[in-house]
Every structure is written in C-alpha cells, then in structure tokens.
Amino acid sequence: MMPVMHYWTFDLASLAILLALGLLYGSMAGWRRQRGAGLYGAGLVLLALVQFSPLHTLALTCSMSAHMIGHMLLLLVVAPLLVLGLPRRPTGWSATHIDRLSAFFSTAPWIGWLMGLGTMWFWHIPGTYRASLAHGDTGIIPLCTLAGPSTDWAANLIHLVHPISLVMAGVCFAWPLLGPRPSQRMFPLTGVLYLFTACIGCSLLGMLITFAPAGSYYPYVPGQSYYAMLSVLPAGWPAEPAVDQQMAGLLMWVPGCLIYLTGAISLFIHWITDDDEAGQIAPVH
Amino acid sequence: MITDVELPEPEKSLPGATVNSDQGLLMWISSVDHKQIGIMYLLMALFYLFVGGLLALLMRVQLLVPNNHFLAPDAYNQLFTMHGTTMIFFVLTPAILGLAVYLVPLQIGANEMAFPRLNAFSFWISLFGGLLLYFSFLAGGAPDAGWFSYAPLNQTQYSASPGIDYYCIGLLLSGIGTVATAGNLAVTIITLRTPSMQYKYMPVFVWMVFIDSFLILAAFPSLNAALAMLLIDRQLDGHFFNTDAGGSALLWQHLFWLFGHPEVYIVVLPPFGVLSEVFQVYSRKPIFGYPFVVGSGIAISLLAFGVWVHHMFATGMGHTVNSFFAVSSMLIGIPTGVKVFNWLGTMYGGSIRFTTGMLFATAFLVEFTIGGLSGISFAIVPIDWQLTDTYYVVAHLHYVFLGGSLFGLFAGLFYWFPKMSGRMYSERLGNWFFWLFVIGFNLTFFVQHILGIIGMPRRVYTYPALAGYSALNLTSSLGAFLMGLSMLVFLYLLYDALKRGKRAGDNPWDGYTFEWLTSSPPPLKNFTTLPPVYSFRPVHDLNHPEIGDYKKPDEEKYGTKDID
C-alpha cells in the first residue's frame, strides 16, 4: 500500500451530514427498505469516501485535482445516486414535499440547470475557491477544531457548507431528469439537450481553469501539512502547482464531459427502447 | 384501416407561389420553396466542387515533377488555401445543407420549412459569401495562410494582401447563413412533423440533421467570433492574435479548432444519415440497431467538444493536456465504430442491389475506416509530433472528408436523384463514374500516407528529387487527373439523365420514408394527406402491410433483440 493511502480523516460535520441524509431517507421511506435503497446507500458510501478518504486529505493540503475529483463526484455522481434512490412510495410529510418539488422542477427545470452549473462556477471563482478550503495549517477539521477559536470556526463554516452545497446543487440538477416521480420528469430528448448544454457550460469552466495563468487557483499555504503530504506522494506524481491546476481543469473538461455524455446516452437509450411511450396503438387489420 | 391525416395549409400564401415554371430563372431567384432552395444549394456545392477541384489539379500539376516552376510559391499558397476553404465551407457545408433542406420537410411529412424566407436568405448569403471570397483574386490576392489561417501568419505583417480580409468576411457571411439554416432545420423538425411521427419514428437522416443543427449552433459562433476578432486585428489594429503587441497566437488556434473539430462532425453526421437510408433500402432490410445508430450520433456530437485540442498537440501545451486529449480522441473511435458495424449488420443477410448509390456507400465503409484508423494514429501524441504537417495529415483528412463525407453525399445524390429530377440515371455511366473516382481517389491519397511518413511536408510548393518522392508524387498527380476525368463523366451522366433518362416512378427503389410517397419530382405542395406513422419505415409499412414493422416488438424492429 502506498503511504498516501494511510491518510484517512474523520470529522464530525461530515458524519452529521451522512447521518442526516440517512435519517431523511428513513423517515421518507417510513423506515422500510424500498426499491432504490441500494442506490441511495451507494450515494452515501461515495459521499463518505469523498469526505473521509485520502482524496480529502490531498484536496485540503496540496492537490487541486484531488479537490476537483471531489467536486465532480459530489455534484455528478453522489447527488444523482441520491435522487435515483429516493423512495418511490414516500410516506407522510415527505410525499407532499416530493410532489411539490417534482411539480416545481417540471415547470422550471432551468432552475435545476442553473443551480448545478451556477454552483460549480461559483466555487471556482478563485476567491471562493480559497475560502472553501479549511483554514489553519492542519487543514483537516478534526473534532477539536469545532470547538476552536471563533474566528477559525466562522472561516471554516464555508468549508463545511461547501460539500453540502455541491450535493444540494447536484440534487437540484438531477431532479428534473431522475426525480422520484417519473411522470414529472423532463421529456428525455429535452433531457439530452439539458445535459448537452450543461456539458458545454462545464467544459468552458474546465477550459478556463486549464488555461488560466498558473497560480490563479493556487491557494494552498505551504506549511507543515503541505510538505508532509507532498513527501508521501508516489514518485512521478504531478505535484507542481501549475500542472496540478491544469490537471484539475482538464478533469472537469474531459472526464466531466464524459459523465454528462453517459447520462445523455443512457437517457436516450432508455427512452427509445421503452415500449409503451405515449401508448402508440398499431392499426387493426 | 389506415386513415390519412390532412396537412394544414399556410394561412398566407408564400411569395413565389404564383410564379410558375414558365418564368425560368425568376422562379428560382424568387423561390422560398425548400425543394428549389435545396437544389440551388446542391448546384452551388457542385459549382464550387469544380472550382475547388480545378485549384487542386493546378497544385497537382505543380507537384508532378520535382523542382517544378509551373507555379510560384505565393500562387501555390493561395491555391491550397482557397482549395481547402472552398471544399469545407462552400462544397461540403452547402451540400449537406442542401440535402437537409430538400429532404427534411419531405421526410417528416411537412410542406415547407418553418421559416421559408429565412431559408432563402441563408442560401443567398452563403452563395454571395463564396463569391466575395473569390473576388479576392481580383482585389489584390487570395488568402494565403491555409484554410485554418493560423496566427500570426494571418496578420498584416505576414499577409499584406487583402486576401485574409476577404476570407474573414466571406466566411462570416456564409457562417451566418449556416447558423440560420441550422436553427431553421431544428425548429422545422421540432414543430412540423406530421402529428403521428414521434421522435422515435424519425428517419435516421432526419435524426442526424437534427443533431447536426445543434452542433452547428454550438460550434459556429466560435468561428464567427474568431473571424470578427481577426478582422479587428487587421483593419483596426487590434491585438487579439498579434504576438508583437502582446496578443496570443494560440488563442486563434483554440477558437478555430473549438469550431473546427465539431465542423468535421458537422459535415460527416448528415452523410451518416444518408448512408443509413441508402444501406437499408438497397439491402431491403431495416437499419440494424436504430437506437444505436442515433445514439452514437448523439455521442459523437457530445464528444466533439472534448477532443479538439488534439489538433494542437504540437503547440507545446504540455504532457498533461496532451494525455487527456489523446485518450478522449481515441474514444471517438467507439461511436464511429458502432455505426460502421450497424451498417455492416444492415447489409448482412440483406438482398443487396449494387446501384451506383450503394457502390458509393460500400466504398465509404472502406475509405472512411482507413481515414478513421489514420485518425486514431494521430491520437497517439508521439506519432502526431512525427507526422503533423506532413502529407500523412493530407491523406488522413482527405480520407475523412472525401472517403467519408463526399462518398456519403454521392451515395445520397444517386439515391435521391430520381426523386429530385423525376428521371433515372444510367447505371452504366454511374458505374464508370464510381470506378474512375474511387481508383483516382485512392491513387491520389493513399500514396500520400507514405509520402508523409518519409517526411514530405505539406504546403510547400515543390520538393527536391529525393528517393521515392518523384514516383509517389507522380502517382498522386495521375490519380488526381483520373478524378478530374471522372468528374467530367459525372457531368455527362447528369446531362444524359436529365435529357434522356427514363421517367422515374414515385418510388423506384421501394424506399421507406415519406419522400417516396409524393410524385417525382415532388409538386410545389409536397403532400395533401399522409398516412399515420407507426414505425421508422412508414412507406414500407404502407406498401407491405403484411410485414409492417408496427407488428413487431421494438427489440425486433430495432435489431436490438438479445440472442439467447
């Protein structure tokens, strides 16, 4: 095992998010396992991995590309999995909320589009990007930092809001396409266009980051943990800041586009091979 | 019992409807009819094909023997620039738009485009854009910086003649026309389909044009912006691409290829649609794997925006950038390969008629695959570094644009010729044309792969008498003359068919789509009534009710049935 793989972290805030999402599911599903629970669970596991695995440590201490992988997983994989896994027969209070949300997104899907893309762009303004990182040389927010000095706490609040906002934006983005009310979903071909335009919007941001002057996004404060992390990276790892920033942009541009593409193609294939669309009746001879 | 749907009439009659065919040229000039505009687009493409072909022949004469002085270096620069620009923007683009404008309303059961006047505007502005580009020859010199007109060569200090200014304005005008037609086609397909034609029953050609329209709308603005910026650089002393003044030469390449790579797919997707129609009708089978043919078209168009940096591997952007685009460029091979296998699957087990159209379609499979494979070799960065700007690139791009797009367009032209003209062409002449063209094409361009590998740079007006160079260039030039000869056969074929051709019936090939339901050539008003659509082969269902597609389950209809 490579040394970098030992750097797992743990923090209460992420645990609280995971617990809250788990409880939310339980209460929506009436504390019964419904179809899709596996997908929802997979979303939670992936969210936990993004928040606790060495990816998170790298993202916080030295690597913008690791940070970018985290963004993309949260917005484009975790959130759609959560939406897909929502209970089909929600109980009690949640049924009305899900209906209301579905109705809202079916009349104004562009809001979901804008939330998804807008959030992605927002967190990549160099200023907000810098703010979204944890402050203080430790970088990671272990239990004790929560009770730390109040200024640190306020600065780290943005860091805590950051993953939540990405998941929320991703949920809004995915809802019109994959929402739990199939009848309220977008027409699949419009969905392809929805993803196509989002792909272009995301590619543009990727290009911007790739070709931005080296250092535009280089917010990592060289300190103890920065050098400590660099020293555990495997040999040949592209750790120079300029390359790292370029790779982050490229990750969003190329593999990011592939995620949208996969979504578009699967929407299309599901739709066209779906037998009973619009109840077409063949002529009777 | 099939009940026909009546097609609505426009509330106000369109201009030109009162002008009849006796009024000759006036009928064409004043026309807003999609069929006449489509034919004018095709004639424009044919005209520029001859002009651009003539330029190419002049170049091949220059390269016939080493150290030739038939053309001066600056004249040679103008010729290859004009040849490339003409073939991409004034042959392939109008040809695909012409076929689309002619056929889309017919295939979806509409009587007109959504915006008939815009349609006419788009055609005329494209035509005049081309004429303006050629006017540069009289105005002091044609553009001479290659069809992609790289900065800083496109700046006034390197290209002082007004050629590049004409390049900017000519392409801007035709670009406006192209964008307008794309919007027009997309709106037409969304709003004017006959009521029972769901999206999943649209002919593959309509699908490809539909996808293509969005690709045009997304890609052309980048070119138009770059051209406007270049014009500002040249006329108003702007500094976008002028490296002396702190501009970025690389920016031009980015803007150009952000358009330029999708452009390759823009001119190849509609021919893919054409071929899908040609393969199924001449194989007397429905297309194999309809969802995959259409789905791979969508995949290609989405990938188009994630691969264009592979044109710039040699610009020194670093290993990180190059590696990403090497991988994504190889991915393009997947949806394209899917399509090739779909077409092979369509032919497999079919009762094939090798008409001239089908010959071109079959040859396409071979030639385009060669172009695709040389393309994949370019995705490997070290190979790209070795071979970029050599004749290997020239060979590759001609196998894609000719072996891919043009072969597809010829297949479509022969397939729809009876519909457009009402006459059958001579298959004997068609065979002559096909074989001369294919042999000439392969002689010209296949040897250029070798020339590139042994190091002959492209765009240099002559070459020394090195080992291998002379014989290969001679072969290439002879092949080009053969292609030129075949085009004369093609002209005679058209003349012969229009003059002496047998009357074509409404549906001479037993075609599947709505254009075969109306008369040949179609009247000004395409249809009065149409039968409802139950599958993507509505006319086949109508003519062969005993084996209609609508009786089959989807998986059988689309060829997606699992074999257990």
Image (spheres, coloured by chain):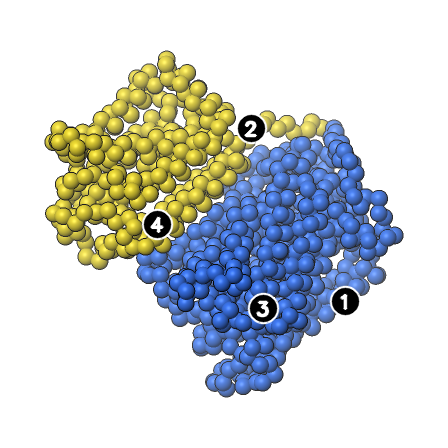
Check residue B492 in the rendering and tell me which mark sits there, or answer none: 1
- Furthest toward the right, the residue is B22
The residue indicated by pointer 4 is: A209
Q: Which chain is yellow?
A: A
Residue at x 55%, y 47% (from the top left corner) = B217
Q: Residues within 10 Å of mark 4 (few under 14, many from 20)?
A: many
Closer to the camera, B20 or B172?
B172
Q: Position of residue B420 (x, y in %)?
A: 75, 52
Is label 3 or label 4 in front?
A: 3
User: Marks 3 and 2, how far apart in space?
Assistant: 61 Å
Closer to the camera, A250 or B206?
A250
Q: Identify the element where label 1 is drawn.
A: helix
Give the residue type at disc 3: Pro
- The chain containing the residue under callout 2 comes to A
Closer to the camera, A150 or A165?
A150
User: Marks 4 and 2, how far apart in space?
Assistant: 45 Å
Is label 4 or label 2 in front?
A: 4
The residue indicated by pointer 2 is: A276
Residue at x 51%, y 77% (from the top left corner) = B460
Check residue B162 in the rendering and tell me which mark sits there, or answer none: 3
Residue at x 58%, y 46% (from the top left corner) = B213
